Image: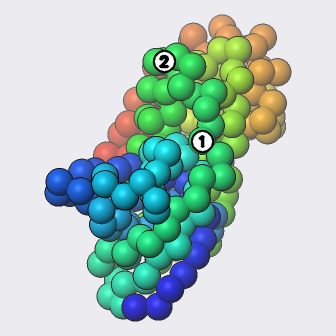
């Protein structure tokens, strides 16, 4: 096993045993990797302070698995950004976790050319921290996500959302009626797509 280091956003964590965790994370290149964090639930020195939480942007040092599909062994984790604003209310955090799920379903091991997916996720989490209206961020993310994935063709009503950077989501508050009119249909498209993306 060779040692590697990279920056990731943690997508999911699962308890594996009394002291171990399995993590899924997306790299800055857009590649999804899976890690075994041995002793993570007991080691305050290597993984202390709740660093290994979904939504956290972290620097990870790990031993690379020689075989594709096998877990990499996590050695050390350093927190870069915990997106603390996401935890100010339940609805905001729930939406952030849903967005992680969408990205997790379409990201793949071995795909090192999907920086746009990592960037979309990072910018969305940052926008959601300070969003005046989280539902606008939800629609904003959905449309950019579906367009990037080649699922939809841009329609005229989508233009303000597609032209606006995620960081500027608060500028879209005047389009709340569009969100009310279209969100249900767009949400159904996203759910259908991510279910079929994993088949």
In the rendered image, the vertical position of residue 14 relative to residue 136, given as above or below: below
* Disc 2/disc 1 C-alpha distance (Å): 17 Å
What residue lies at 54% left-to-right and 67% top-to-bottom?
60
In the rendered image, the vertical position of residue 146 relative to residue 155, given as above or below: below
Residue 31, horizontal then vertical, whole percent: 52, 68
Residue 89, horizontal then vertical, whole percent: 52, 16
Tell me: 124 left or right of 16.
right
What residue lies at 55% left-to-right and 54% top-to-bottom?
9
In the rendered image, the vertical position of residue 122 relative to residue 116, given as above or below: above
Q: How many labels does the image show?
A: 2
Decide if residue 60 is in sight here: yes
Q: Residues within 10 Å of mark 1 (few under 14, many from 20)?
A: some
In the rendered image, the vertical position of residue 55 relative to residue 45, given as above or below: above
**Residue 91 circle label:** 2
For disc 1, the marked residue is 82
Closest to the camera, between mark 2 and mark 1, is 1
**Residue 171 circle label:** none
What residue lies at 78% left-to-right and 11% top-to-bottom?
174
Residue 32, horizontal then vertical, whole percent: 46, 65
Residue at disc 1, secondary structure: loop
Question: Quick one: 55 or 81, which is closer to the camera?
Answer: 81
Tell me: 144 left or right of 149.
right
Tell me: 83 left or right of 52.
right
């Amino acid at each position: 096993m060779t040692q590697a280091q990279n920056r990731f956003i943690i997508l999911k964590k699962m308890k594996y045993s009394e002291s171990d965790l399995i993590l899924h994370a997306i790299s800055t290149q857009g590649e999804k990797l899976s890690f075994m964090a041995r002793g993570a639930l007991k080691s305050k020195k290597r993984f202390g302070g709740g660093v290994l939480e979904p939504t956290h942007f972290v620097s990870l040092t790990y031993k690379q698995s020689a075989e594709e599909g096998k877990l990499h062994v996590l050695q050390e984790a350093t927190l870069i950004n915990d997106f603390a604003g996401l935890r100010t209310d339940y609805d905001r955090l729930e939406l952030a976790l849903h967005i992680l799920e969408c990205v997790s379903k379409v990201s793949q091991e071995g795909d090192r050319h999907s920086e746009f997916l990592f960037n979309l996720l990072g910018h969305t989490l940052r926008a959601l921290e300070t969003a005046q209206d989280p539902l606008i961020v939800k629609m904003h993310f959905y449309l950019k996500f579906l367009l990037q994935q080649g699922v939809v063709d841009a329609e005229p009503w989508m233009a303000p959302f597609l032209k606006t950077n995620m960081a500027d989501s608060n500028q879209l508050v005047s389009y709340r009626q569009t969100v009310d009119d279209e969100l249900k249909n767009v949400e159904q498209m996203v759910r259908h797509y991510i279910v079929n993306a994993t088949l």
